[in-house]
Amino acid sequence: MKWKNIFFALVLLGLFCFLSGVVQAKPKNFQTLLEERRVSLWVEGQALGDLMIGSRGQMEFIYVDKILIDRARKEGWIEAPEWFRKECQYFGSSELKKKDLFVVRYKSLLPWNFSPEEIRVGEYRVTWEDVLTNKAFFPWGDLPSEVQGFFAFGVPRISGGTTEIAYGGYGVPFIIPGR
């Protein structure tokens, strides 16, 4: 009887050790965290199944928080694209006090009059004062087809877990990770 109890205790202990390793999640890498903080938006256009037809432009918004920056630093910025590293220089700056940082990548697919002032995060409309990147370093205004750019901007801290990110009248829902 005593040996059965000891054997049962050892099996139970081994099971707990195994399950604790399974339950503890492996830390997410930079690319996984980046995907969780990214949302794509098509400006104009008509959806046809998985295709977008006649879209004026495509935008990608990346929410930059401490978790993403820390993971990028821990991995030595190797996994981070150059445009991301460049625009994240503003993270933690005095301009972002009590604000959230977003990095936007965009591409004109048709001629497009692009302005950051058409961006809205929740109820907040972005102004030129919110744009952190120097205007001389990214294309804006009347853009011909196939022009690409990226820039960073700050908005007042977002409350709640879900918000809408929009350009003009075109918006997509965005779930803020960790909130």
Image (cartoon, rainbow, N blue to C red):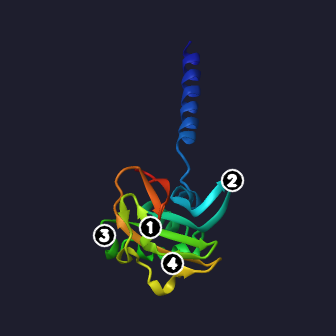
1 and 3 marks in contact (CB < 8 Å): no
Question: 45 or 134, which lies in front?
Answer: 45
Secondary structure category for the residue under label 3:
loop
* Mark number displayed over residue 86: 4
Q: Is residue 120 above or below residue 139?
A: above
Q: Residue at x 54, y 33 (%)?
A: 16
- Residue type, mark 3 in image: Lys
Give the label on residue 119, or none.
Answer: 1
Q: Amino acid at mark 1?
A: Ile
Q: Is residue 168 visible?
A: yes
Query: What's the amino acid at mark 2?
Result: Asp
Local packing at callout 2 (Cα closer than 10 Å; few below 14, some 14-19, many 20+) is few
Q: Which residue is mark 3?
A: 97
* 1 vs 4, front mark: 1
Q: Nearer the viewer, residue 80 or 129?
A: 129
Measured as percent of width and height from the top left, residue 84 is found at 53, 72
Q: Secondary structure at mark 4?
A: helix
Q: Which type of secondary structure does the marked residue at label 2 adopt?
A: loop
Q: Position of residue 135 (x, y in %)?
A: 45, 84
First of labels 1, 3 by sequence position: 3
Q: Quadrant of the N terminus?
A: top right
Q: Nearer the viewer, residue 110 or 6?
A: 110
